[in-house]
Amino acid sequence: MKQMSLVHKLTALSLLVLLAATGCSRTAAADGEDLMKEISPEKVEVLDAYNEESLLSAADFSVELFKANSGNENTLISPLSVLSSLGMTANGAEENTLMQMEEVFGLSRNELNMLLELYIRSLPRKDNLKVSMANSIWFREGERLNVRREFLQTNANYYDAGIYRAAFDEKTLKSINTWVEKETDGMIKDILDKIPEEAMMYLINALSFDAKWETIYKENEISEDQFTAEDGSMQTVDMMFSTESLYVRDDQAKGVIKNYSGGKYAFMALLPDENISVQEYITSLTGEKLHTLIKEAENTPVFTMIPKFESSYSVEMSEILKGMGMTDAFDEKKADFNGLGTSPEGNLYISRVIHKTKIAVDEKGTKAGAATVVEVVTESAAPVETKEVLLNRPFVYMIIDKETSLPLFMGTLRSVE
């Protein structure tokens, strides 16, 4: 595993939704036509403040998705980005398909739309902290897909989605890849290697986070030390030493919260007790437990050692989401995405959900990227003791929004090589 320097950008391509129809198709020669002049965001019901119950439901979804992805290797997912993109997709779901998606979210479609609309609207843009979400919908021109205007309008209203009609040829492929690269600040390149013959629509959500630590490490605060991997091997790594001020503790782990510039976002690491494995600890996590840990962090000195590390991860999530209860969306007979549109070639259903991520942590801050592809086809204060959190063995880590207690990223570090 490589170590990276001067790192301070966190970028997540949260979800790329591919809607497709099986059968023969043509390719046309046209670039993306911007339809935003036809479909502009309308005034809709929005939230003025976060609803605590909705935030807890979103935290539950995040933890359950994280649990379902944990295994014997370094893992990293972006629950917020997956939730955002599935939320866009849900605006085209109906009947039992929608009901199952809402059950997995823990939120109604409308509640999720409003929660994410407020989140997007509240994102900060400062010199040392820039967070942004960008959404776009691309659909094939011609008669092979009839898109519901209401579906496009809803996603424009709540997700501020750009809407493009395109030929789905090589020029479209280049346009989509260029859009993704631009919106992820160059982190995600060539997200698509081709546009399949059966492709009907892409819904793309990009999440970009660019931040420095609130206090950047000095040269004398970095030195080589040992990290004990999960298999017991000793690995030499550059460790970053500091004293932080937010300590977290539950019945199975202790941890630290280290702020990024401005204090709204932070890196949280949770180190299971010596007799508790990372997997055992993950199993014990709940959304409410995570929410409470963040909200009730103790303000006390914490001597901290964090390794510089880089980790990448990829997974196909369809079986995971089915296991969470979202089954009909993946069933060619039962899926109901009629609210999205229809195809004369058959019923639309989700075929694959591919999620890829990467993260690097060093003395300047954090840089990470995530890409998820959902493919839809037609059938076929007093003086206190200083705490200590030494991350020299496997641990769980997150990048959190302290205001909402929601994780943008959740991962495990079991090995630094």
Image: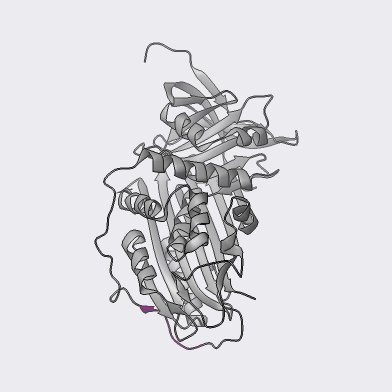
Residue 288 vertical position relative to residue 329 in the rendered view, above or below: above
Q: Position of residue 371 (x, y in %)?
A: 53, 59
> Relative to 337, is 372 above or below?
above
Left or right relative to 65: residue 167: left
**Of residues 111 and 37, the one drawn nearer to the viewer in this rendering:** 111
x%, y% of residue 59?
47, 41
x, y (%) of residue 131?
A: 38, 50
Identify the residue at the far top of this view: 383
Q: Is residue 323 left or right of residue 110?
A: right
Q: How many marks?
A: 0
Residue 395 is one of the magenta-drawn residues? no
How is this picture coloured? Answer: one colour
In the rendered structure, the answer to whether residue 10 lies left or right of residue 262 reads right
Residue at 47% across / 64% down in the picture?
93
Image quadrant in which the C terminus is located: top right
The answer to whether residue 411 is visible is yes
Observer able to see residue 15: no
**Residue sitting at 41 percent across and 30 percent down?**
295
Quadrant location of residue 404? top left
The front one of 151 and 387 is 151
**Magenta stretch: dominant secondary structure:** loop
In the image, 341 versus 200, the foreground residue is 341
Percent x, y for residue 152? 37, 70
- Between 199 and 54, the one lying in front of the other is 54
What span is in magenta?
28-34
Q: Is residue 30 magenta?
A: yes
